[in-house]
Amino acid sequence: MPLIELKHVVGGYGGAPILNGVNIAIEKSDIGVIVGPNGAGKSTTLKAIFGLLKVTGGTIEFGGEDIANSLPDRLVPKGLSFVPQEKNVFTSMTVEENLEMGAFTRKDDYSETMTWVYEMFPVLAEKRRQPAGELSGGQRQMVAMGRALMSRPSLLMLDEPSAGLSPRYVIEIFETIQRVNQEGVGILMVEQNARQALAFASKGFVLAQGQNRFTGTGPELIADPEVAKSFLGG
Amino acid sequence: MDELIFFINRVLISGTVLGSIYALGAIGVTLIFGILRFAHFAHGDMMTMGAFIAFVLATALAAMGIILPLPMAFVVMPVAMVLTAFIALGIDKGFYAPLRARGAKPVTLLIASIGVTLMIQGLIRLIFGSGTKSVFVAGESKDIFRFDMSWAGGSRPINITEPQLIMFVVTALIVVALHFFLTRSRLGKAMRAMADNADLAQVSGINTALVVRVTWVIAGSLACVAGTMLALDVALMPDLAFNIVLPIFAAAIVGGLGHAYGAIVGGFLIAFAETLAVFNWTAVLRPLNAVLPDGMALPANLALVPTEYKLTVAFVILVITLLVRPTGIFKGASS
């Protein structure tokens, strides 16, 4: 049984649906990457999973349970976490407070998880008392990921984690994502740096007009001449 | 020396009293703005309502023949705070929450809160009449402490009333408690997180409905404290705090909307500016008459602003702040 499975998901913000039958299945060991042109419904898919828009058709199962249209305060305790693309840190709060907010739904002692996050992002440990708003773009992205990991999710969803980062940081963030995955967290992410991200994706999904166009492993998709021509810029 | 004592009595003590009231009111205004993104115009009347609740409780206790060494209205304050907090939650549930659920704009909520203002004031007038009352029940009197200053060569004492003294202590305790709540507790931090970025707070799994409720509880109970203190210091009337809702908003904006510490600083800043502006400087500068040439004397009243125009001071500071530092002293949520 997959960790998360979307079957023919239809949904939008009211009005015409943006998603017209999206199918996605991810195992806990997977790194799933969603690529596709602008307006294909990539980010919308993540938001639909996270209850941020209305799902009107199809099913979303997480750990065998139907979670369509559940809100984040119910999804986070179930093991789902989401890093939005923009404004994904609490700028006026310190790095450590940002991490604590990620653990808001936890009633147990989360100090071990915090140590784990600091081991993963040593630079954050140095800046733990600094307001997150004072950090660079790449460091903010780490705070955002750290925050999302504080709930000890089984699936981490990231919306364009490399957006706006310098090439050096893009590599670093992608490496971190793979490391998180090796620690037993399933990954589902949307990426504009499609070729780079698909290279390490165990599952790749090419969306267009709110529907799956191609599905396969990342390397398979890169090797597919049709995908390369239409979606990866040749 | 007498001039200094006069200054302490008229500026330092009065300014601190007024500042405490403004600060407690402005904290509520700023927290509500930070969390719910609208200017809660009815906040002054929530203060008045809190004072009337304390008044009713105090009268009831006094009627039961209970006599205590402290003003009754102060003793019943914790209960009055709880009741005011509940009413605040009820007002939110009844009037603001349905509008939010429909995605109403902040300005709609502002207008709704003006409606709530009229409603609260109307209800108070309906029940208690429009006259002025004393919150000192059953023959209590306002104790005045006089600190003899003859040891320092002063012929007059420093005067401070019992409610004023209580107010200083209570305000200090509340500010410290609020600080620890916002910086140490899970819910307090969640409140700051939601004021900082409501969408991300939701995504993090923070129970935003709970944060909203906590905000009303804090804002409501602090409004009750401020209103009761104001009633103890002056008198109780249906438009008690409505008259100061504008300086309270000015304090919240000057401090930086959404910023609790800013509201405290803003409250004291506006209060001292008002107090200093209406202060008759002649009283302090009178000794200069001796050195002034013959035929020249200080005028009898050297106040910068006549007392009846005190309110304008808050606006002048507000306008200057908005021109020079639109986000407020502390960087506010929005301006």
Image: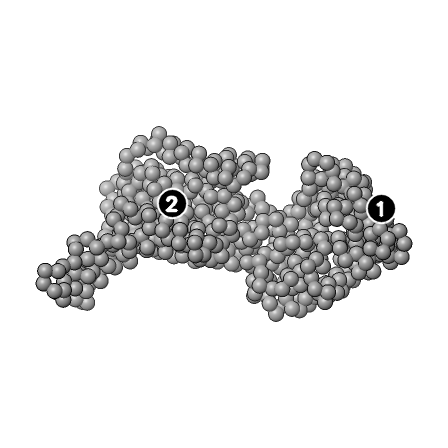
- Please state which of residues B130 and A104 is positioned toward the viewer in this rendering: B130
Is A225 positioned to the left or the right of B163 in the image? Answer: right
Percent position of residue A170, x then y? 73, 63
Percent position of residue A194, x then y? 79, 56
B15 versus A130 height, above or below: above
- Please state which of residues B89 and B254 is positioned toward the viewer in this rendering: B254
Percent position of residue A132, x then y? 59, 61
For disc 2, the chain is B
Could you tell me which residue is drawn at 84 percent across and 51 percent down? A230
Note whether residue B177 is visible.
no
Q: How many marks?
A: 2
Quadrant for the N terminus of chain B in the image: bottom left
Q: Residue B239's quadrant in the figure?
A: top left
Between the residue at mark 2 and the residue at mark 1, the CA separation in whole angstroms equals 59 Å
Is B266 positioned to the left or the right of A87 in the image? Answer: left
For disc 1, the chain is A
Is B20 positioned to the left or the right of A233 in the image? Answer: left
- Please state which of residues A124 and A140 is positioned toward the viewer in this rendering: A140
Q: Where residue A213 is drawn, which disc sits there?
A: 1
Check the image and name the residue furthest to the top: B126
* Amino acid at the residue labelled 2: Leu
User: Do the residues indicated by labels 2 and 1 lie within the same chain of the protein?
Assistant: no
Label 2 SS: helix
Q: Would you name the residue on which mark 2 appears?
A: B246
Could you tell me which residue is drawn at 30 percent across and 48 percent down? B310
Percent position of residue B134, x then y? 27, 40
Q: Residue B280's quadrant in the figure?
A: bottom left
